[in-house]
Amino acid sequence: MASQWPPRRAETYLATIPVYNGLFTVTGIAGALTATISKDGGTFAACSNAVSEVATASGVYKITLTATEMTCDHFILKLTHATYGDFFAIGDTVQTIDLDTVPFPGDGWAEAT
């Protein structure tokens, strides 16, 4: 599944990013946006998938980040437009836990008396 909240470590994630103009209004912009990602404060690297607008002139863009791109605790997503510059989104990932591997009282734990 590509979209879930919160973003999970090492799982694909559908990121949605509103783009604001100088008046803090969400705005659609003509032309292509390219995406790069910084993982855990590292240098920015190109994303595998393309950015697309959710709906024409909505000003909200989306990109599916791959499981490899999500192998981090913190990420910064940078969308770049040739004329309008850079737009940023930041996020944190969570580690999922397999509850079948977590010990519970009665599963061999010494219980307090």
Image (tube, grey):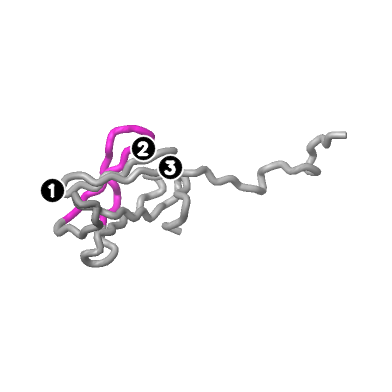
Residue drawn where x is 24% and y is 46% of the image: 87
Q: Could you say which quadrant of the image residue 46 lies in?
A: top left
Secondary structure of residue under mark 1:
loop
The quarter of the picture where residue 104 lies is: top right
Q: In front here: 26 or 112?
A: 26
Amino acid at pointer 3:
Asp
Task: Indicate which disc, 3 or 1, sits on the residue closer to the N terminus.
Answer: 1
Residue bounds of the magenta highlight: 32-51
Q: Which amino acid does label 2 sit on?
A: Lys
Q: Residue at x 26, y 55 (%)?
A: 51
Q: Mark 3 points at which residue?
A: 92
Q: Which mark is residue 82?
A: 1
* Residue reaching furthest to the left: 83
The kind of residue tagged 1 is: Ala
Q: Local crowd at mark 3 within 10 Å, few (<14), some, or many (≥20)?
A: some
Query: The C terminus is located in which quarter?
Result: top right
The reply to whether discs 2 and 3 touch (Cβ–Cβ < 8 Å) is no
Quadrant in which the N terminus is drawn: bottom left
Q: Residues within 10 Å of mark 2 (few under 14, many from 20)?
A: some
Near-viewer residue (95 or 66): 95
Residue 64 locus on image (x, y percent): 35, 54
Q: Is residue 91 magenta?
A: no
Which residue is the site of mark 2? Answer: 39
Percent coordinates x, y for residue 5 in the rendering: 47, 53
| Left or right position of 55 against 66 | left
| Marked residue nearer the N-terminal end (1 or 2) | 2
